[in-house]
Image (cartoon, helix red, strand yellow):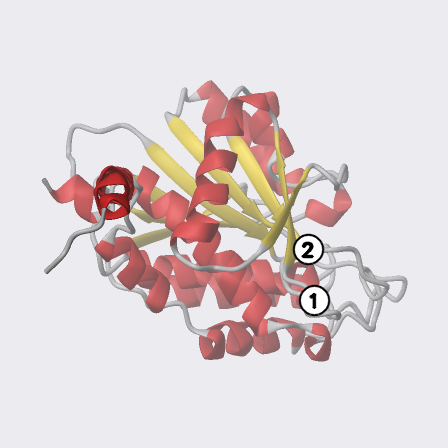
């Protein structure tokens, strides 16, 4: 066989490409498995159940009923300890104790279960924020099976629409107790994608830049498929109280839509594909940070 001179010239380039391919980040096989467990069916079922309370506005009967529903759902998941925080507001806090008995680190994901509307009796809040609560329940269902190294808290806040009351109450209490919260991920309005653009806004401040970068990397690494934008939303959210107390916090948010805060914010506006994708993106980072990845087993 005759070997042409150009083949010798190409050989170093081929070796260089192989070496860099070997250095490229590889998906964590356990994280990949976790993402595969996210269920659009479960997400839709939870959104429908919360919408069925008709109104979850603070002070409405459906608000108290939603708190009891979420408490019951979390309590049915093995290994979780479930409590109400703040006797008046009744934030629902489900805790999965980490496998490392020495670690004080806490990682959190949250959403708000209250809703709002121009008609207090008709505030379905499917995209804002029943979908976020559905994602938090998915996190709990999935991570409870995989014993992360550090403690994870799954939180559903009350009174977000009345001035972030629930998350302020918790963040104030956590700061006084010097709770070692390493990361809070807020899932608020992550369901509406009417143009099927898969455009997601990541809202963060400087101390969460590493978390934002991890989300950007994982969006490609695990083939999640979002078009990402950054800090396009300046609205408040339950991440704000944590930031003000010096904790690292980040929020995911959909594009704006016309039905928010109205009786028309119903489940027919929900893209479970979009919500599940947001769940996978945030889970890929939170699970790794909390020590649920394969690399943490070594």
**Rendered view: 207 above or below 198:** above
Displayed quadrant of residue 117: bottom right
Position of residue 13 in the picture relative to residue 286 (left or right): left
Residue 83 in view here: no
Between the C-alphas of marks 2 and 1, the distance is 7 Å
**Rendered view: 18 above or below 113:** above
Quarter of the rendering occupied by the C terminus: top left
Compare residues 208 and 242 and report the one nearer the observer.
208
Question: Residue beneath label 2, please?
Answer: 254
Quarter of the rendering occupied by the N terminus: bottom left
| Image position, residue 284 (x, y; %) | 38, 50
Question: Residue beneath label 1, please?
Answer: 193
| Image position, residue 292 (x, y; %) | 25, 47
The residue depicted at 63 percent of the width and 62 percent of the height is 198
The answer to whether the residues at label 2 and label 1 have Cβ atoms under 8 Å apart is yes
Kindly state the secondary structure of the residue where label 2 is placed. loop
Q: Earlier in the sequence, mark 2 or mark 1?
A: 1
Kindly state the secondary structure of the residue where label 1 is placed. loop
């Amino acid at each position: 066989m005759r070997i042409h001179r150009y083949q010798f010239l190409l050989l170093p380039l081929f070796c260089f490409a192989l070496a860099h391919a070997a250095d490229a980040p590889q998906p964590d096989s356990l994280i990949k498995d976790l993402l595969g467990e996210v269920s659009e069916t479960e997400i839709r079922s939870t959104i429908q159940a919360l919408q069925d309370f008709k109104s979850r506005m603070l002070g409405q009967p459906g608000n108290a009923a939603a708190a009891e529903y979420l408490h019951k759902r979390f309590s049915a998941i093995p290994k979780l300890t479930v409590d109400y925080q703040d006797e008046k507001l009744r934030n629902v806090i489900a805790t999965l104790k980490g496998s490392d008995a020495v670690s004080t680190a806490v990682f959190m994901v949250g959403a708000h279960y209250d809703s709002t509307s121009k008609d207090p009796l008709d505030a379905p809040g499917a995209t804002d924020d029943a979908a976020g609560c559905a994602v938090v329940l998915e996190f709990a269902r999935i991570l409870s099976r995989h014993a992360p190294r550090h403690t994870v808290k799954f939180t559903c806040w009350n009174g977000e629409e009345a001035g972030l009351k629930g998350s302020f109450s918790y963040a104030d209490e956590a700061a006084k107790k010097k709770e070692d919260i390493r990361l809070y991920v807020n899932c608020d309005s992550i369901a509406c994608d009417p143009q099927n653009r898969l455009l997601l806004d990541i809202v963060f401040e400087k101390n969460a830049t590493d978390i934002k970068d991890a989300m950007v990397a994982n969006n490609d690494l695990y083939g999640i498929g979002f078009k990402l934008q950054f800090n396009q939303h300046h609205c408040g959210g339950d991440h704000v109280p944590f930031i003000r107390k010096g904790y690292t916090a980040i929020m995911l948010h959909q594009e704006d839509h016309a039905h928010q805060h109205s009786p028309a914010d119903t489940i027919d506006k929900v893209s479970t594909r979009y919500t599940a994708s947001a769940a996978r993106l945030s889970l890929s980072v939170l699970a790794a940070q909390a020590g649920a990845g394969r690399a943490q087993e070594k």
